[in-house]
Amino acid sequence: MTTHNHKAPLFLGIDGGGSKCRAILYRDGDGILGTGLSGAANPVNGLQAAKESILDACEQALRQAQLAPGELRNCIAGAGLAGVNLPSCMAAMEAWQHPFGQFHLTTDLHIACLGAHGRQDGAIIISGTGSCGFLSVGSHQRIYGGHGFPQGDKGSGAWFGLMALQHALQASDGLAEPTAIAGELAPLLGSHEPLEWVEQMAGQRSTAFARLAAVVFRAADKQDAVAQAILAEGAGYISELGQQLLDDGAPRLALLGGLGPLLTPHLSAPIQAAMTPAQAAPEMGAVYYAQDCLGAVPQAQAQ
Amino acid sequence: MTTHNHKAPLFLGIDGGGSKCRAILYRDGDGILGTGLSGAANPVNGLQAAKESILDACEQALRQAQLAPGELRNCIAGAGLAGVNLPSCMAAMEAWQHPFGQFHLTTDLHIACLGAHGRQDGAIIISGTGSCGFLSVGSHQRIYGGHGFPQGDKGSGAWFGLMALQHALQASDGLAEPTAIAGELAPLLGSHEPLEWVEQMAGQRSTAFARLAAVVFRAADKQDAVAQAILAEGAGYISELGQQLLDDGAPRLALLGGLGPLLTPHLSAPIQAAMTPAQAAPEMGAVYYAQDCLGAVPQAQAQ
């Protein structure tokens, strides 16, 4: 049924985030044998749901390679998950009675960095729904930011969305400069009425605010001074974060996440110059991580 | 059993907020006959819980006056609730099959204003967990702010707490000026470790942030520049809100809410000069509201 190289071990590379989980099945020599995509896998927002998303994505990847779910026990899994930088969350996930042959767990940031720099030393900045920086140089690793919404994650989608809504609401009271942001928000929130915006956004999480981020970029393009000031503040923070990573010894820097392409032209010149494109996806970084963990163990024995 | 004046109607004045609900039983000539205190009564955070809190507080007030719960049907209730400035929330509460003789519903802001100015025209600023301004002059009413957390409520406890945490976290990354706020936060959050602060505050609501507000005032007292800048920004917003209310025609202004005494010395001189102390509590304002709604109806008939 398969033509796989049965001497080399099967790896699962798992990238679990707040909205989705990706998995790849990989074997040296054969490359990627299958992929899977499932739902949210941030254990902070639901431990059981995260485990189910991981298994769902991995079983999809096995199925694509025409392997049964029972093959999970023959796979060496590397997983990078959001949230496991929090010690209690890492402990909860490590207590998992998982079905894999081996399960090597690290942060989503670590696997993204390993992927972006093809396993070499380097640093990444992620700006998507949230924001943060991560550096991995030799045995030195450090996270900058990643403090969550609304207390952190400056320069992220959620932060830009929050700033947009804050300024538009204050302007509606005559307590801040009028801004074209209000007009850009209206179609997204289905109303021109600030009271209805408030009603719609009450109690919403970061993802709902991140959906509003684009209005800042659109209004800034139209020379709106308020939007331009927000953009300068957010991009300024991302540039400072990049400088901090370079100062901390990163030989290379990559900007990842959905906001990357929008932010890049607004970053400082030295940071733009230091940026390199990402070489591989985070789930491939997760495979690298599992391979590194396997380390000295002879491959035939490990399988 | 009672010596009440049976010709005058019984009023219940209800003040329902995000953390508690107060009720008073009142009759002209007799004054306050009983009081009650129960849990959260903001319908946005739970419609059924709000109704239960209202009934709990009112039945306590009746009990104090040695009246049975069945007497609710002989009471004219005035209620000011948080959240009912949102049309959907107002509609949901108005659909209530309430047990009162009459139930007159308005916002928590309106009854606070009626109480603070003894039923006269005026405006209030509330800074507690949230913040907002409210003006009632003749038939003109307007709310400023009150947009909720984190998109609004600048100058509120939740806003000061959020600013404190934001600045302390950025400083922990070396991405903001070091601040004495970090040292003030540590005892409140039970740790000197920013990662544990993040873990503890993840997904928390405004009340959890408001618990941190005092650290800004404490650090500012110790001449911390970051805390002083936050305080100047928050108090500056409250002063602008006050000026907006005066410009909109308010003949008098009162500052209510837990942060009032802390904020007052930091407000602008014209706003401090315009401030008058509150004359009566919001629940008394709710009685005034019910009496105003009763209006032309003869009192004997109304009962």
Image (cartoon, coloured by chain):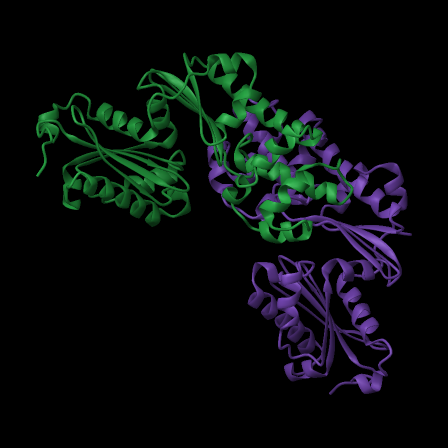
Chain colours: A purple, B green
Q: Where is residue B97, by image quadrant?
A: top left
Give x and y (percent) for residue A58. 67, 73
Q: In this view of the protein, which residue sits in the foreground, A32 or B160?
A: B160
Q: Quadrant of the C terminus of chain B?
A: top left
Point 75% across, 32% down: residue: A232
Q: In this view of the protein, which residue sits in the foreground, A223 or B137?
A: B137
Point 56% across, 27% down: residue: A170
Q: Is residue A80 above or below residue B109?
A: below
Q: Quadrant of the N terminus of chain B?
A: top left
Q: Where is residue A297, by image quadrant?
A: bottom right
Q: Is residue B230 above or below residue A28?
A: above
Q: Is residue A229 above or below residue A298?
A: above
Give x and y (percent) for residue B118. 31, 19
Q: Where is residue B112, by image quadrant?
A: top left
Relative horizontal placement of residue A216, taking residue A301 as reference (left or right):
left
Would residue B68 be seen by someone viewing this image from the given angle? yes
Point 58% across, 30% down: residue: A168
Relative horizontal placement of residue B98, taking residue B176 as reference (left or right):
left
Q: In this view of the protein, which residue sits in the foreground, A207 or B186?
A: B186
Give x and y (percent) for residue A116. 83, 58
Relative horizontal placement of residue A271, taking residue A20 as reference (left or right):
right
Point 51% across, 15% down: residue: B271
Give x and y (percent) for residue B128. 48, 33
Q: Is residue A90 above or below residue B26?
A: below
Q: In this view of the protein, which residue sits in the foreground, B258 or A216?
A: B258
Relative horizontal placement of residue A159, taking residue B287 as reference (left or right):
right
What count of labels does the image hold? 0
Would residue A193 be seen by someone viewing this image from the given angle? no
